Every structure is written in C-alpha cells, then in structure tokens.
Image: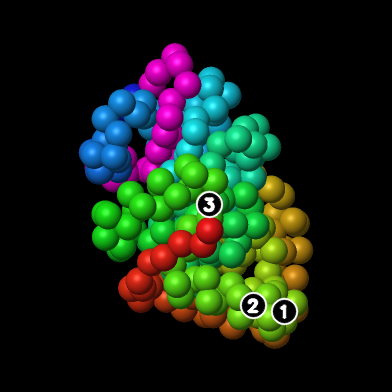
C-alpha cells in the first residue's frame, strides 16, 4: 500500500512498486520546491484511487509495475484527469517505449539511469506543458514518422495489448497465467498470440517464445543516452 495518503490534491503523484525509489524521487524533487505535496502509489489500482481523490498536477510513473506495462494505466489516468501531466521514468529502453508512452498520453519519458538533475529538469518542463525526450529518443521518433515505421512488420507494428502479451510470453508465462495477469480470457490471449506471430513473421509458438525472451532480456539492459527536451 502507499506509504503516504492525503485528503487534499497532491502536486505530485509517484507511482512505483519500489518504496526506496518513491522515497528517492520525493527527496530529489523537494530540492526544487519544498512546498510540493506528494502522494505515493505502489501500483495501478492505488494510482487510480489517488487520481479519483484529487487530480495531481503531475504523475511520475514507472513503465513496468510488477512486470506489467503501464500503458493502460496512463490511458486511464488521462481519461480520469486530462489536466494531469504524466512523466514516465523507467528502466526500459526509451527507443522501444517512448513513442508508445506519448501515444498513451504521457508528456515525457526519462530513463532511470539518467542523472538526477536531468530528471528534475524533465519534471519542470512537463509541468510547463512541454514534452521531454532525450536527443536519441527524439531522433528515433522523427525517423519513425519520416519512414512510417509503425506500419512496418515487426515489433513496432504490435498494438499496446499485443506488446503486453509479447512481453509476458518472454517472461515465461503460459497462456492461462497471461490471461489472469491481463484479466482477459485464454481464447483472447491465443488470438493475440496469432496476431503477434503474423505481424512479426514468426511461424511457430516456440520461435515466438524465443524471440520474446530475447526481447525481454534486451530491454532490461538499455544503453545510456544523453537527455534533452522538446518545446
């Protein structure tokens, strides 16, 4: 459960399933403004309840909560509170997920490996109504727009829900486990598996599992990148 709750509207909601990370963000951001009020959530359900109690000015969200992508959480939060700015701070490689986070409704994407000062800058820029991306992520996004890569076969052609299923396959979950994790039926999981194989040009379930496993391994060891912002 969250370690802090307030009856009034918080300035910043921090959504992360690691208490020490939430503590670190609060300590860091209090250096910007010690009057900011914080609320914490350790998962999607807590985050939604926090937003219902009072929409925060900004929500800082880990992209992977308990191993599940938070793209659906971002969409739900924006639907509940369109005025809340969302900044994703994640271990996951921005070149794989920044564009998806922005499409879901986030205003910025920062990797956790980035210096604390950069995270502070990202928070301030997002609060100003601007979009924050690193130079690498921004260049990759421009390349995708120019080359229309999202319509090409492969990883970037997967829908957000297909991507969630793909990652859970890579984490070793079976069909029934994936169904329970995503709260969908096993038949729906099988439909997603079929679509994923078609989009990625994969012939067998074994090959899909291998590719998904390699993807999950790769995304947990992202390369570092310098950060910048879009205005």
Disc 2 to disc 1, how far (Cα)? 5 Å
Cβ–Cβ below 8 Å for labels 2 and 1? yes
User: Which span is picked out in magenta?
Assistant: 5-22
Expressed as whole percent of the image width and height from the top left, the position of residue 167 reads: 54, 65
Residue at the (45%, 50%) spot, across then down = 125
Q: Is residue 1 above or below residue 92?
A: above
Q: Residues within 10 Å of mark 2 (few under 14, many from 20)?
A: some
Q: State which mark lies toward you, 1 or 3.
A: 3
Residue at the (45%, 16%) spot, across then down = 8
- Nearest the viewer among 157 and 224 is 224
* Helix, strand or loop status at disc 2: helix
Q: Specify whether 187 is left or right of 182.
A: right
Magenta stretch containing residue 124, yes or no? no
Q: Which residue is mark 1?
A: 148
Cβ–Cβ below 8 Å for labels 1 and 3? no
Residue at the (30%, 63%) spot, across then down = 113
Q: Which residue is mark 2?
A: 144
**Can residue 69 be seen by looking at this rendering?**
no
| Mark number displayed over residue 130 | 3
Disc 2 to disc 3, how far (Cα)? 21 Å
- Nearest the viewer among 7 and 199 is 7
Q: Residues within 10 Å of mark 3 (few under 14, many from 20)?
A: some
Disc 1 to disc 3, how far (Cα)? 24 Å
Badge 1 or badge 3: first in the primary sequence: 3
* Helix, strand or loop status at disc 3: loop
Q: Quadrant of residue 160?
A: bottom right
Q: State which mark lies toward you, 2 or 3.
A: 3
Q: Quadrant of residue 141?
A: bottom right
Expressed as whole percent of the image width and height from the top left, the position of residue 136 reads: 46, 75
Expressed as whole percent of the image width and height from the top left, the position of residue 185 reads: 71, 49
Scheme of colours in the image: rainbow
């Amino acid at each position: 459960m969250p370690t802090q709750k307030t009856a009034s509207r918080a300035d910043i909601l921090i959504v992360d399933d690691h208490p020490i990370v939430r503590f670190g963000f609060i300590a860091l951001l209090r250096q910007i403004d010690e009057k900011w009020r914080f609320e914490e959530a350790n998962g999607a359900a807590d985050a939604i309840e926090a937003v219902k109690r009072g929409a925060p000015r900004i929500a800082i969200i880990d992209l992977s909560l308990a191993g599940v992508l938070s793209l659906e959480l971002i969409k739900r939060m924006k639907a509940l509170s369109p005025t809340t700015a969302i900044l994703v701070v994640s271990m996951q490689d921005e070149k794989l997920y920044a564009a998806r986070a922005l499409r879901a409704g986030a205003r910025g994407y920062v990797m956790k490996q980035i210096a604390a000062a950069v995270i502070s800058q990202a928070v301030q820029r997002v609060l100003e109504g601007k979009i924050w991306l690193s130079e690498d992520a921004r260049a990759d996004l421009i390349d995708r727009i120019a080359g229309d890569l999202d319509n090409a076969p492969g990883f970037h052609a997967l829908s957000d829900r297909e991507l969630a299923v793909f990652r859970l396959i890579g984490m070793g979950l079976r069909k029934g486990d994936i169904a329970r994790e995503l709260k969908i039926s096993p038949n729906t999981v099988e439909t997603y598996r079929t679509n994923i194989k078609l989009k990625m040009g994969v012939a067998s379930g074994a090959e899909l599992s291998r590719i998904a496993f390699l993807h999950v391994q790769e995304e947990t060891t992202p390369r570092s990148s310098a950060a910048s912002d879009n205005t």
